[in-house]
């Protein structure tokens, strides 16, 4: 293989080699998957990152405030209780220019009344895959707009807690530019 071909192949492997094997699977329908045919998934950011970035339409429960085509990069929580809509896709560490790591968090409407004693603040506990690095970020008032910057590139496992509810997801952050 020629040197340019090798460089292209290496680039493809570096970008795509982090995806998990097989087709990504959205959360089960009972736990909040997007409607059938609504999301095309892109590769996850790391072998440990199993939450795929979907690029199709947002589910009806998450598209309030949007008009027209609601195709946005987004990641569903593992239980389908929350979706992260990625305005700063791809998420990047130490971004030198371009959009910030803006994420709009949208919680699925609760089937029961929330516990009035539970904090509405969205508490994000992020753990870097393969390390002991753990950070906490908070979104006052619960799911909503945020800037979520994390300190290192890689796959981050997120525990999301708000209003007595909990969900998890993985988000991949690329190295800065």
Image (cartoon, rainbow, N blue to C red):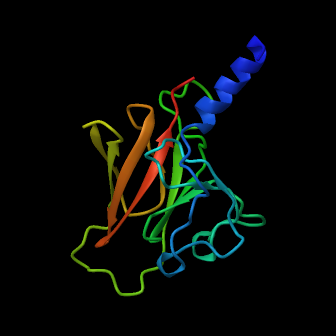
Which is more toward the observer, 67 or 177? 177
* Quarter of the image with the C terminus in it: top right
Viewed as shown, does residue 56 lie left or right of 132?
right
- Asked if one can make out residue 139 in the rendered structure from this viewpoint, the answer is no
Residue 39: image quadrant is bottom right
Q: Where is residue 50 shown, x and y percent of the image?
A: 48, 53
Viewed as shown, does residue 90 lie left or right of 149?
right
Which is more toward the observer, 67 or 24? 24
Q: Where is residue 16 shown, x and y percent of the image?
A: 62, 38
Judge whether 9 appears above or below 101 on screen: above
Residue at the far front in the pictured view = 1
Judge whether 74 appears above or below 153 on screen: below
Judge whether 60 appears above or below 152 on screen: below
- Asked if one can make out residue 14 in the rendered structure from this viewpoint, the answer is yes
Viewed as shown, does residue 156 lie left or right of 45?
left
Residue at the far left in the pictured view = 117
Residue at the far top in the pictured view = 3
Q: Where is residue 29 shown, x and y percent of the image?
A: 54, 78
How many discs mark residues in the rendered view? Answer: 0
Which is more toward the observer, 127 or 47? 47
Q: Where is residue 161 shown, x and y percent of the image?
A: 32, 63
Residue 67: image quadrant is bottom right
Which is more toward the observer, 104 or 157? 157
Residue at 43%, 41% in the rendered image: 155
* Quarter of the image with the N terminus in it: top right
Residue at 32%, 81% in the rendered image: 114
Residue at 60%, 48% in the rendered image: 43
Residue 10: image quadrant is top right
């Amino acid at each position: 293989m020629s040197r340019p071909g090798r460089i292209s192949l290496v680039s493809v492997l570096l970008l795509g080699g982090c995806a998990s094997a097989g087709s990504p699977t959205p959360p089960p329908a009972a736990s909040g998957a997007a409607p059938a045919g609504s999301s095309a998934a892109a590769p996850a950011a790391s072998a440990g990152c199993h939450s795929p970035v979907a690029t199709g339409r947002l589910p009806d429960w998450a598209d309030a405030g949007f008009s027209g085509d609601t195709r946005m990069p987004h990641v569903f929580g593992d239980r389908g209780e929350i979706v992260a809509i990625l305005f700063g896709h791809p998420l990047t560490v130490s971004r030198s220019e371009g959009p910030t790591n803006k994420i709009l968090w949208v919680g699925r409407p609760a089937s029961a009344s929330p516990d009035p004693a539970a904090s509405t603040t969205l508490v994000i506990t992020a753990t870097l895959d393969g390390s002991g690095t753990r950070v906490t970020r908070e979104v006052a008032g619960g799911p909503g707009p945020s800037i979520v910057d994390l300190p290192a590139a890689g796959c981050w496992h997120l525990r999301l807690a708000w209003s007595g509810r909990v969900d998890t997801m993985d988000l991949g952050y690329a190295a800065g530019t």
